[in-house]
């Protein structure tokens, strides 16, 4: 059956048709924490469901359902990319989430700061300070897979950076002297975008770029999974938590009363907390 699957074309989120790659699927399952035996069993089940032209989205959903029967925390790690897409519909939860990841890296962060540039006023998504670095961060959130940030993104952000490089925080009146600019997205950048950013000394971070220091690596190494990763909460409950500015699984461990406020009762409450605790453990991955 695996030999037959090699000749099947599946459809990526970009619309591109590619051969089904069982090895790639296995790598993602192992990366999430599945055992070698569990991964092989799930791949066998997935292959039995395959049809010509099947979307990668449907394949991932099938693997997720099977994995959830094995281990909810492992399934939650497997759906991390989808969990980031669910941080919307607005981009504000994503900005908050990025600020939390940067705090873990030792930065002092501010979200949604208005600064007066040389020409106009700008709202900076995240300001991150550490030692001699004061970084302007633009967050590009997308709620659909396959979206590619093209060269226009770093082009216009560089223009903003030039305007605010020596500016003033409108709320406090304090001077702001940015010396770095970084653009972070939950999807991907085009080759032109990465080439331009490299030439202009801009830092880009996406789901899988740069290698070994991409957004997925930040999350694995910090254990700071988004609340949308949880398989034990409904979509409505996740949205309610996001509206209350709760973006981390870790947050509900510290203040789990908020789960009761949105209607989560025992014994499911204990299941949510147990899954959250498992996800909060940093998951070092040897290869990305």
Image (spheres, helix red, strand yellow):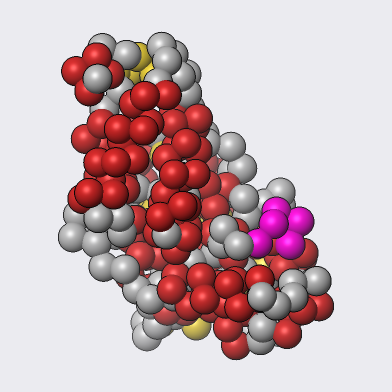
Q: Is residue 251 visible?
A: no
Q: Is residue 38 visible?
A: yes
The image quadrant of residue 176 is bottom right
Rendered location of residue 103, percent (x, y): 47, 79
Quadrant (top left/top right/bottom left/bottom right) for the N terminus: top left
Query: Nearest the camera: 162 or 11?
Result: 11
Q: Is residue 280 magenta?
A: no
Q: Residue at x 40, y 21 (%)?
A: 50
Rendered location of residue 250, percent (x, y): 54, 78
Q: Is residue 100 above or below residue 160?
A: below
Apparent side of residue 264 relative to residue 180 in the rendered image (left or right): right
The image quadrant of residue 87 is bottom right
Q: Main secondary structure of the magenta part?
A: helix
Q: Residue at x 40, y 65 (%)?
A: 219
Q: Residue at x 34, y 40 (%)?
A: 42
Query: Nearest the camera: 176 or 85?
Result: 85
Q: Residue at x 70, y 53 (%)?
A: 235
Q: Is residue 243 above or below residue 158?
A: below
Apparent side of residue 275 relative to residue 258 in the rendered image (left or right): left
Stretch in magenta: 233-237
Callout count? 0
Query: Nearest the camera: 194 or 283?
Result: 283
Rendered location of residue 118, percent (x, y): 63, 62
Rendered location of residue 109, percent (x, y): 54, 78
């Amino acid at each position: 059956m695996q030999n037959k699957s090699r000749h099947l074309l599946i459809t990526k989120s970009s619309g591109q048709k590619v051969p089904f790659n069982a090895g790639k699927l296995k790598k993602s399952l192992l990366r999430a924490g599945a055992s070698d035996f569990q991964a092989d069993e799930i791949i066998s089940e997935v292959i039995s469901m395959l049809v010509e032209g099947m979307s990668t989205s449907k394949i991932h959903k099938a693997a997720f359902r099977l994995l959830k029967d094995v281990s909810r925390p492992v399934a939650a790690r497997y759906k991390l990319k989808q969990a980031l897409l669910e941080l919307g519909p607005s981009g504000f939860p994503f900005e908050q989430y990025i600020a939390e990841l940067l705090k873990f890296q030792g930065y002092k962060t501010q979200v949604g700061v208005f600064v007066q540039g040389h020409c106009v006023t700008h709202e900076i998504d995240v300001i991150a300070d550490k030692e001699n670095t004061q970084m302007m961060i633009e967050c590009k959130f997308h709620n659909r897979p396959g979206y590619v940030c093209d060269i226009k993104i770093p082009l216009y952000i560089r223009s903003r950076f030039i305007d605010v490089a020596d500016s003033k925080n409108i709320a406090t009146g304090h001077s702001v002297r940015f010396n770095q600019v970084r653009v972070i997205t939950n999807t991907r950048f085009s080759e032109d975008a990465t080439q331009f950013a490299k030439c202009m000394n801009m830092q880009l971070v996406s789901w899988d770029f740069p290698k070994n220091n991409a957004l997925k690596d930040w999350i694995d190494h910090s254990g700071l999974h988004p609340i949308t990763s949880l398989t034990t909460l409904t979509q409505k409950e996740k949205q309610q938590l996001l509206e209350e500015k709760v973006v981390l699984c870790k947050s509900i461990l510290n203040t789990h009363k908020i789960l009761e406020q949105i209607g989560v009762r025992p014994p499911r409450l204990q299941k949510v907390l147990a899954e959250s605790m498992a996800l909060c453990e940093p998951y070092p991955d040897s290869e990305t």
